[in-house]
């Protein structure tokens, strides 16, 4: 099931999004500010983030810039900011799409689906940490990703 993180400081809009997404079988988490959003990305590992730009503690563009590089989570901006400059700033910062308010729920869901389809699914953390074992050898996947740090010779 696809996990969506809704980041919006307006409780009514956040609730509307959560209810509509859950009705369409998405797993949904929510955050009301940028700091909570960054914590939720690390803790919940969402498949996509719906992000408002006007947050109380930091600008949404700063949230995009501060997302952990390892998460590679796609971001769909949902904002009342209509100006081209704002859209360009968000997209240049790493947003995958931008929807202006007011919006049609059908359009938002279509754009959400498109972002999800374009994004390759990440392996679960447990699979990343697992070792691969055979009769002849064992490969510790996390250590194998960094042969120099593990003291292994490089080719």
Image (cartoon, rainbow, N blue to C red):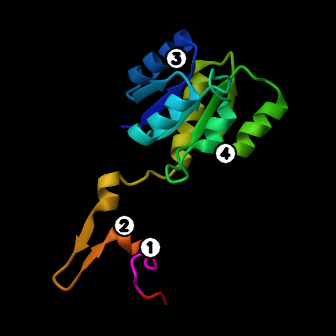
Tag 1 and tag 3, C-beta contact below 8 Å: no
List the residue tagged with mark 1: 146
Q: Magenta region's main secondary structure?
A: loop
List the residue tagged with mark 4: 94
List the residue tagged with mark 2: 142
Q: Which residues are magenta?
A: 147-152
SS state under label 4: loop
- In the image, residue 53 lies in the stretch drawn in magenta: no
In three-dimensional space, the C-alpha distance between marks 3 and 4, rounded to whole angstroms, equals 22 Å
* Front of the two marks 1 and 3: 1
The x and y percentages for residue 35 are 54, 31
Q: Residue at x 59, y 38 (%)?
A: 75
Toward which corner of the image does residue 45 lie, by quadrant? Answer: top left
Q: Earlier along the polypeptide chain: callout 1 or callout 4?
A: 4
Q: Residues within 10 Å of mark 2 (few under 14, many from 20)?
A: few
Comparing 133 with 115, the one in front is 133
SS state under label 2: helix
SS state under label 3: helix
């Amino acid at each position: 099931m696809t996990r969506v993180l809704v980041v919006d400081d307006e409780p009514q809009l956040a609730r509307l999004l959560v209810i509509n997404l859950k009705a369409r079988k998405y797993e949904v988490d929510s955050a009301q500010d940028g700091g909570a959003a960054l914590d939720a990305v690390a803790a919940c590992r969402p498949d996509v983030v719906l992000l408002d730009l006007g947050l109380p503690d930091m600008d949404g563009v700063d949230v995009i810039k501060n997302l952990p590089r390892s998460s590679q989570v796609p971001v769909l901006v949902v904002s009342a900011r209509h100006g081209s400059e704002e859209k360009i700033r968000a997209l240049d910062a790493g947003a995958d799409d931008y929807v202006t308010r007011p919006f049609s729920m059908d359009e938002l869901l279509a754009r959400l689906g498109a972002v999800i389809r374009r994004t390759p699914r990440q392996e679960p953390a447990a699979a990343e940490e697992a070792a691969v074992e055979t009769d002849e050898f064992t490969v510790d996947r996390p250590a194998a990703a960094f042969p120099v740090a593990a003291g292994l010779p490089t080719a």
